[in-house]
Image (spheres, rainbow, N blue to C red):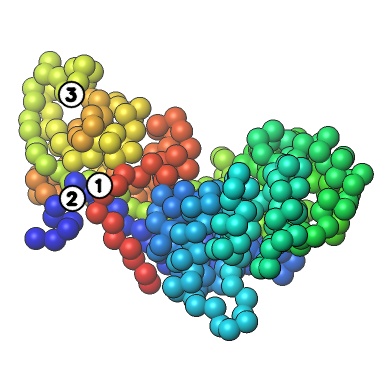
Amino acid sequence: MSEADRAGAVLTIDLGAIADNYRQLRDRVAPAAECAAVVKADAYGLGAKHVVPVLHEAGCRTFFVALLDEGIAVRQVLYACAPPAAGGNEPTIYVLSGLTENTAHVFAEHRLRPVLNSIGDIDAWKAFARDAVSQTAAAVHVDTGMSRLGLPENELASLRDAPERLAGFRLAHVISHLACADDPDHPLNALQRDAFEAARASLPTAPGSLANSSGIFLGPSFHADMVRPGCALYGVAPTSGQPNPMKQVIRLQGKILQIREIDTHQTVGYGATHRAEKRTKIATVAVGYADGYLRYLSNRGSAHIGDYRVPLVGRVSMDLTTFDVTDVPGNLVHPGALIDLIDQSNTVDALAEDADTIGYEILTGLGARYHRVYRRR
Ligand SMILES: *Cc1c(COP(=O)(O)O)cnc(C)c1O
């Protein structure tokens, strides 16, 4: 018996495809800009422990996480896979959520760089840098239209009037974040780019970084000196409504537990929301909303068995989902057979659309109960 035998589903993660996606994005922005990688939320649910070494091997030297604890974990992974040569440069890790109270020394201890999101952050980091012996580089984040994190216009203005507040530590990057980059026609894109360049011009000279995955595809005027793709590395389409240039990274196969035949008027699942209109074969699969297979997919989603598309019927329950497999040859549907819930023909984006959400939410919700297989090529 293997671990896969015990699990209700097998999640295969193609690390080679992630490396290929990284190289594609890097080549798109080279040589003018560096390509960093965003590995927050455990590399978008795919496992930072496995993903980070592959990105490092593909040449990535700057990583972004959301939280300090994620930064500490990524530092450990990088330290293990690429121990720094004496005096050599370590890969850079930025923590997007920035300085929180009493954490400056933790950044220094793990050689992490905060993204400073306010004048208060900047003053705190400067005060810390005054007493610190070790590296104290940081990025400053200016808000150009997200109204979420980063210096708003008035704080930028006070910084412009008192540039000495930035003296005392190394301003390694100035960053901002695009709100609508997946929609190339949105007027906010150019407005944010221009506001970003204006902000940079008012600050001490430092490399700039504006583009997420989608921003890369808006063209070179958005690349600045470094781009920060996340979702595209993991196969999510960067531009809505356009063909996806990225390689698919994951395959999710659910296990059929039971097959049954029901007749006209019999119903399936909680709430009896699906009623058979003829003799129907139902396959019950060991995946449910507890695995991140969203309940909203009830009576909307679909899966594949070989080349056969099978509709999801009835409600998704916590541990089980039911599919109409009437049209699939009998030799393909039996207890223990695997059914493709996410694959090349039913991509993360397609599943997300059926679930009225985005690929990011599907990836970061991938369940802990799946048996995970990491494929390297
Ligand atoms: C998450 C995030 C990214 C990566 O965005 P994708 O759309 O996944 O490429 C880049 N920059 C910031 C500030 C982020 O929060």
Mark 1 in CB contact with mark 2 (< 8 angstroms):
yes
Quadrant in which the C terminus appears: bottom left
Element carrying mark 2: loop
Percent of width and height locating residue 330: 10, 44
Q: Nearer the viewer, residue 332 or 235?
A: 235
Q: Which residue is mark 3?
A: 269
Residue 181 occupies quadrant: top right
Q: Between marks 2 and 3, how big is the CA–CA gap?
A: 22 Å
Name the kind of residue labelled 2 in the image: Ala
Q: Which residue is mark 2?
A: 7
Element carrying mark 3: loop
Classify residue 291 as left or right of residue 98: left
Q: Residues within 10 Å of mark 1 (few under 14, many from 20)?
A: some
Q: Between marks 1 and 2, how big is the CA–CA gap?
A: 7 Å
Q: Residue 369 — which label?
A: 1
Name the kind of residue labelled 3 in the image: Gly
